[in-house]
């Protein structure tokens, strides 16, 4: 059984400033490490297709989506800032749509295709984008678009979304906070951008705020205690993953001390849950991870865990 990897060259059209950490080189680092590790030969690689406005409307406010389309720069020397961290340049809209569309492709693949596992190697990330606003490098919430599509198009009654990016997935929480069909699990360094999640009270949101300097064994223990039994009890029809690798000890975006072994471990644990409850179906989408070497190595470790 293989893993299908969705990506598209259009994701590199989203140009940012030279010092911006969310850069096109991130995808090159992932692809290079897949080749170097030999995993390329056991993966099925497919081009993503763009999401439509109707796909985005399931997760986002109609006026917000239309506003992003209207603001899209029309020339290469034009750009706008959608928030203090989130740039939109010529070509960005195409990247946004392919990033969101990859999740829809992934849902179709794991529900209809030969493979029960899919990974979307795309940018920009999405988990900070709320129902009606861009935030923190994110414009459309890729994982939320995928989840809403799955519930609209397939007999999917319960989805577990696991977000192990080092930053709280505030946008995903915002979109699903009132939806008891979705169990949202987010671990993150606290305090750290966007400084949310530590005080959330909801029966279907399980946040794990952890201090700077947290080690992998501490994170694994918290996940094993808080997430894994809850996901098991929830009995999801699908497991979706916001896979952010910026908690790695080599990544300057945080002060977490996770390593490749930790990402392999969470992949293995999620695989076991998926095998028990949802015919092995897992869709993971790339979120953060800004140190090129550790990003590529961590993606490979995670994919080995779920395979």
Image: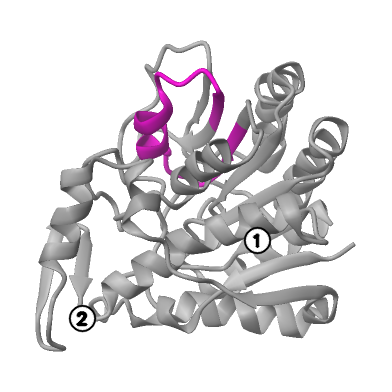
Q: Secondary structure at mark 1?
A: strand
**Disc 2: which residue:** 90
Residue 133, given in percent of the width and then of the height, sits at: 21, 44
Classify residue 247 as left or right of residue 65.
right
The residue under the point 38% across, 41% down is 58
Residue 264 marker: none
The image shows residue 266, relative to residue 41, as above or below, that is above
Residue 184 drawn in magenta: yes
Mark 1 Cα shell of 10 Å, populated few (<14), some (14-19), many (≥20): many
Farthest-out residue, bottom: 76
Residue 109, given in percent of the width and then of the height, sits at: 69, 59
Q: Secondary structure at mark 2?
A: loop
Residue 119 marker: 1
Mark 2 Cα shell of 10 Å, populated few (<14), some (14-19), many (≥20): some
Who is closer to the viewer here, 12 or 93?
93
Who is closer to the viewer here, 213 or 229?
229
Who is closer to the viewer here, 57 or 220?
57
Residue 39 drawn in magenta: no
For the image shown, how many numbered marks are present on the structure?
Answer: 2
The image shows residue 210, relative to residue 215, as above or below, that is above
Looking at the image, can residue 22 be seen?
Answer: no
Residue 114: image quadrant is bottom right
The residue under the point 75% across, 19% down is 229
Quarter of the figure that contains the C terminus: bottom right
The image shows residue 224, relative to residue 152, as above or below, that is above
Point out the stretch of residues depicted in magenta: 160-185
The residue under the point 70% across, 24% down is 231
Classify residue 96 as left or right of residue 240.
left
């Amino acid at each position: 059984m293989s893993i299908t990897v969705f990506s598209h060259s259009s994701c590199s059209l989203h140009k940012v400033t030279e010092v911006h950490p969310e850069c096109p080189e991130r995808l090159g680092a992932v692809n290079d490490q897949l080749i170097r590790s030999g995993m390329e030969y056991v993966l099925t690689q497919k081009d993503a297709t763009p999401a439509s406005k109707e796909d985005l409307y399931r997760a986002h406010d109609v006026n917000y989506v239309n506003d992003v389309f209207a603001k899209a720069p029309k020339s290469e020397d034009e750009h706008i800032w959608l928030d203090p961290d989130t740039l939109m340049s010529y070509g960005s809209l195409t990247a946004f749509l392919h990033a969101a569309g990859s999740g829809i492709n992934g849902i179709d693949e794991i529900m209809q295709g030969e493979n029960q596992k899919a990974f979307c190697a795309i940018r920009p990330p999405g988990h900070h984008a709320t129902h009606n606003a861009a935030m923190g490098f994110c414009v459309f919430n890729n994982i939320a678009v995928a989840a809403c599509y799955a519930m609209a198009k397939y007999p999917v009654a319960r989805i577990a979304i696991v977000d192990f990016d080092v930053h709280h997935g505030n946008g995903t929480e915002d979109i699903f906070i009132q939806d008891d069909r979705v169990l949202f699990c987010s671990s993150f360094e606290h305090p750290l951008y966007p400084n949310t999640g530590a005080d959330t009270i909801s029966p279907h949101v399980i946040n794990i705020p952890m201090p700077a300097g947290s080690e992998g064994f501490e994170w694994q223990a918290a996940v094993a205690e808080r997430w894994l039994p809850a996901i098991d009890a929830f009995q999801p029809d699908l497991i979706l993953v916001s896979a952010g690798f910026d908690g790695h000890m080599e990544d300057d975006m945080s002060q977490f001390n996770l390593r490749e072994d930790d990402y392999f471990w969470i992949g293995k644990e999620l695989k076991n849950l998926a095998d028990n409850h949802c015919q092995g179906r897992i869709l993971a989408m790339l979120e953060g991870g800004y140190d090129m070497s550790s990003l590529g190595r961590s993606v490979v470790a995670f994919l080995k865990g779920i395979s």
